[in-house]
Image (cartoon, helix red, strand yellow):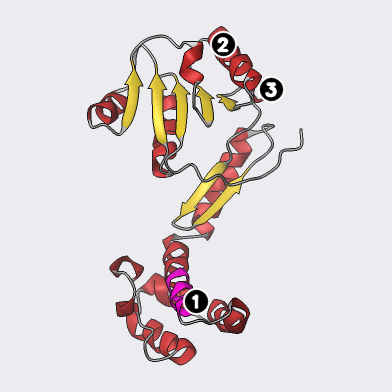
Amino acid sequence: MKYYPIYLDIKGRACLVVGGGDVATRKVNTLLDCGAKVHVVSPEVTPRLEALAESGDITLKRRPYRPEDLEGMLLVFGATDDATLNLSLSREAMGRNMLCNIADRPEACNFILPSIVNRGDLIIAISTSGTSPAFAKTLRKALEKRFGPEYGEFLHIMGHIRRKLLKTAHAPEAHKRLFESMIKSDMLEWVKKRDISRINERLRKTFGKDYEIDTLPKDAS
């Protein structure tokens, strides 16, 4: 199987998770992190899902799945321990041309979930095309060691500087060289060590006196 890699904007979009166990809970957590409106259908749920429902973070229907639960959903996830139910959900979702993922059954999916390294705006997705989830997990752990939190903080700084420059009518090509020089510098190491003085010195030298950590949102530092 040759999969087409893609990143989806699911902010504010309805996504359905059928199942209430640990696997379903992990999928719900990831969906919430991406801003989705999550709907869960399951007679039994974990304490985490119960708490999310009570706080209004998810919509929970504590009953068995029904085909009408698919209405209006962008993504559909099957995460129950009932293989027959999971396959039925897959057929019904795909029959409506919906994107459907069934846990541990790649043959019943029209998309699969990669193993993810999340460092703020840096998202590294690892996939073995469903052939070896264990190897994907091993690669993820190796990449987590290679790419620490400083990468997310560095991108946060770069992103805010880029937006600030664009507001001053700079054409993207005009400051491409400036960003390349930042990438080639020791900025990542300074961010890792939280060496604010060196970071600010480099920002001022590269972009001008109005560019310092204090001019960015507080979490940029």
Q: What residue is pinned by disc 3? A: 107
CA gap between label 3 and label 2 equals: 13 Å
**Label ID, residue 83:** 2
Q: Are dots 1 and 3 in contact, CB under 8 Å?
A: no
Question: At label 1, which amino acid type do we have?
Answer: Leu
Where does the C terminus fall, quadrant-wise?
bottom left
Q: Is residue 218 left or right of residue 175?
A: left
CA gap between label 1 and label 3 equals: 46 Å
Where does the N terminus fall, quadrant-wise?
top right
Q: Which residues are magenta?
A: 159-167
**Label ID, residue 166:** 1
Question: At label 3, which amino acid type do we have?
Answer: Glu
Q: Are dots 2 and 1 in contact, CB under 8 Å?
A: no
Front residue (pair 95, 90):
95
**Looking at the image, is mark 2 or mark 1 earlier in the sequence?**
2
Q: Residue at x 62, y 21 (%)?
A: 96
Q: Residue at x 47, y 30 (%)?
A: 15
Residue 205 percent coordinates (x, y): 45, 92
Residue 41 percent coordinates (x, y): 40, 18
Residue 134 percent coordinates (x, y): 59, 35
Note whether 188 is above or below 10 in the view shown.
below
Is residue 166 on the magenta stretch? yes
Q: Secondary structure at mark 2?
A: helix
Q: Nearer the viewer, mark 2 or mark 1?
A: 1
